[in-house]
Image (spheres, helix red, strand yellow):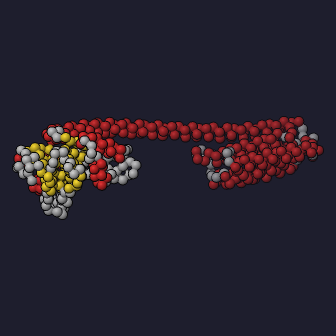
Amino acid sequence: MKIWTGREDLFENDLFNITLLISIVLYILGGFGAYMVGLSINIVYVDIVSIIINSIFLYFSVKNRRHDAFAIPFFIMTSITLIITWYFNGGSEGSVNYALFLMAVMMNVIFYKNSTRGIRLFTLLVVVMAGLHIYEIYHPEILNQFLAHKKQEELVSDRLFGFIMTTVVSFAYMLKLNKQVQREKQQVQAQNEELQVQQEELMAQQEVMEEQQRELEKTNKDLLKSINYASKIQNALSRNSLQELKKKSNFLINKPRDIVSGDFYWVRKVENKTFFVQGDCTGHGVPGAFLTLLGEELLDQIILSDRIWSPARILEELDIRIKEKIAGDSNSNTDGMEVGLLMLDHKINVGVFAGAKRPLLFYNSKTEEMSIIKGSRKSIGNVRNVDNEFHEEVFKVNEKDRFYLFSDGFADQFGEILDKKYSSRRFYSKMEELSALEISKQGEELEREFAEWKGRKRQIDDVMVMGVEV
């Protein structure tokens, strides 16, 4: 069995073993010296007992490699030895006594620093030393009788012995302290190295994230550029409709939720008839915009090329051709559009309206009444339509009459204050309220109403309202 293993995890145990071994050697030398110079035989007995007890401690500490169980008995034995040697070795005149006290205190610091147990043992040692001093003050004659028999060379021997013990314990403490400093230094170095590795990893991750961020920004910039260009194309394709619309008193509110819109309008004059179409395609943004292009192209074919002028028949043909284009043989397609279509026949002054799930608001200038003409329940392109036909409504048109085609985006917008939809009922009521204004002013007031209602709420759908005065 090794007294000093040299292992990092058993350093304190090794230090305790060395301290016990030194104590045994010193007790042997002290007992032998006391016997040779003729000191009290009690000191010799104390040394013999201390040698035996310390040897037992050392044996089990080395065998079990645990010093915890013997540390407290070691301190208690040292305290008892201190009391006995104090009494028989001249009290405060005996340097050995102070060496024992110092050894106990130092060992306590070494093994139990910063702990409640260490504080209690230190307090116990201080109380023992203080009690011995008080005892010496009130009973000096007991100690002096032993001190009187001591020769000068014995006192010198005591001081030398005390110096050796003090030096040994101090060296043990310094060794312990140096070992602890080295251990803490190694821990700090290891932590610094770990932090350095983590910092390098974080920097590498940050570089990757920055590169990804740059790529995302570039992709987003390119995508935004493409969508903005698509918006220009969409507006360019509506140029003919806009020019035709400007020939009449009108207003047009067109607010895409995103840059491009899923709502569209189509206006053309063919001979003595003018066609007004407002469409609301499934979805919004890019998917909805593609459907608007398809819808405008098919309207050109049906009305301008095929010269089909009945609003109901136009919607029927549009429904068939949309299904052919986007549904194919699928029986589950629900993409398509809701459409309101008004044809004004200027020769006979009548209007014919057909709607695919969209209504028409009509203001009669003579009666000054606002009426709602509902469309069919059937939409364009949806294979799940329950109604198989579109119906027409025919009505007389007078000068200064007004009509309004619109998508559901205005009515479906949630408000910031009330946090509910604007609703179709509120929209119809607002249009009736604005009927006394010029039609251009109506558009301005509707713009203001929408902005105030929405507030800081996100726009949830594309918004389009078209108003025309005959």
Identity of the residue furthest to the left in this view: 306
Measuring 76% from the left and 51% from the top, which residue is drawn there?
76
Residue 249 in the image: x percent, y percent? 19, 40
Q: Position of residue 432 (x, y in %)?
A: 28, 50
Q: Residue furthest bottom?
A: 386
Q: Visible in this render: residue 294? A: no
Foreground pick, 355 / 47: 355
Q: Is 269 left or right of 417, judged from the image as shown?
A: left
Kindly identify the residue that appears in the image at 64 percent across and 52 percent down.
66
Quarter of the figure that contains the C terminus: top left
Extreme residue toward the front, this view: 366
- Tell me if residue 56 comes above or below residue 456 in the rendering: below
Q: Quadrant of residue 374?
A: bottom left
Determine whether, in the image, residue 365 is placed left or right of residue 297: right
| Residue 307 rendering spot, x and y as whole percentages | 5, 49
- Tell me what residue is drawn at x 93 percent, y 43 percent: 140
Q: Write the residue at 93% across / 46% down.
A: 139
Residue 469 at least partly seen:
yes
For residue 77, side relative to residue 249 (left or right): right
Quarter of the figure with residue 160: top right
- Could you say where residue 330 lies in the image, as x and y percent from the top left? 15, 59
In depth, the one of 454 and 85 nearer the eye is 454
